[in-house]
Amino acid sequence: MNEAAKIADFKYLTPEVLLDLVEEASGIPMTGLTIPLPSYINRVYELQARRGERIIAKFYRPGRWSRTALEDEHRFLADCAAAEIPVVCPLVLPGGGTLAGTDGGFFALFPKKSGREFEINTGDDLRRVGSLIARIHLAGQERVPNDRVVLSPETATSSDLDFLIHGGFITPEHRAAFADLTSRIVENISGLFHEKEFIRIHGDCHRGNLLDRPGEGLMAIDFDDMMLGPPVQDLWMLLPDHAGRSRREIELLMDGYEQFREFDFPSLTLIEPLRFMRIIYYLTWCARQLDDYDFRANHPDWGGETFWQREISDISHQFQVIMEHKVAWEEGRFFGE
């Protein structure tokens, strides 16, 4: 079996196979250590070189990203590192690039960086993370990716909805209601994104992707979902509740953010629409994993009638929140509730 076939189907990615692939691509002799690490989409392993250092091998899910899209991710990391922003860049391979494999499947190698998940307990914690995100956005605004998701309702979300509605994932009893509800939401929120700033952003900036390294500070990890989108996307997932009940946290994040970069405050109106878009994104991600045995074993009720009834109810509530916050902003109440 050739290299492309070994990477193109994860079921063939045994410890022996992945070690051979890594050694061939890197020229680094490895020990037999292969520790699988948690990853929702990719396959990630901790390895050990014979000379001692630990290396993280990240095998990207076949068919998810093009070579150009993955090079966009690595270029963004390099731009952040050049600006002295703490990120983990992929190792440069003997051929000069950072990506190994073929169009059937790709992988990259990263140095292992330890740290604990960042806990947000104080106002200073929020200011710290706001400052880090602002610095990432300063690097992000310097260039445009070539092949990455554009985070707008009319592109990313509409594409996800087409996949869900026409892919046979929604039960017939609920398909029309789901399609009608989500169509109305997209129609209502699309105008909010017009004329907003779109730059390279992390895209999945929750606490799990922030490491606190004693003596070094905060580090952002896992740029796998980097995209072209509004900067507020990298802030709202850090809030403890809906925007209207997180005003203090928003102010503290902005205090830190504006130490390095000006923030467009009207873009706060995108928080609840982005929450809806995240719901649709996650549903689509789940639908794409249905053939994965582990997913089915861990989510046996996904896609049934009760599941879709609950999802429609949750999305309907989110639509109500979106409209309430939209009116509150227009009336000058800053998402007040």
Image: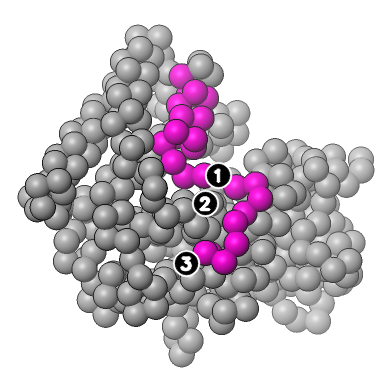
Question: Viewer-proximal residue, 133 or 62?
Answer: 133
* Disc 2 + disc 3, Cβ < 8 Å: no
Q: CA distance from mark 3 to mark 1?
A: 17 Å
Left or right, 186 with reference to 77: left
Separation (CA) of disc 2 from disc 3: 11 Å
Identify the mark nearer the N-term, 2 or 1: 1
85 w.r.t. 273: above or below: below
* Residue at point 89%, 66% (across, down): 95
Residue 315 x %, y %: 28, 31
From the image, which quarter does the N terminus lie in? top right
Circle 2 packing at 10 Å, graded few (<14), some (14-19), many (20+), is many
The magenta stretch spans residue 148? yes
In this rendering, does residue 277 appear at all? yes
Which secondary structure lies at badge 1?
loop
Residue extending furthest toward the right: 2
Secondary structure, mark 2, is: strand
Q: Where are the magenta residues, as a range?
A: 140-165
Q: Amino acid at mark 2?
A: Leu
Residue 83: horizontal and vertical position, in percent?
57, 79
Residue 137 numbered mark, or none: 3
Residue under label 2:
228
From the top left corner, tell me how far across and down residue 127 is, in percent. 30, 76
In space, the residues marked 2 and 1 are separated at their CA atoms by 6 Å
**Callout 2–callout 1 Cβ contact below 8 Å:** yes
Q: Residue at x 28, y 70 (%)?
A: 254
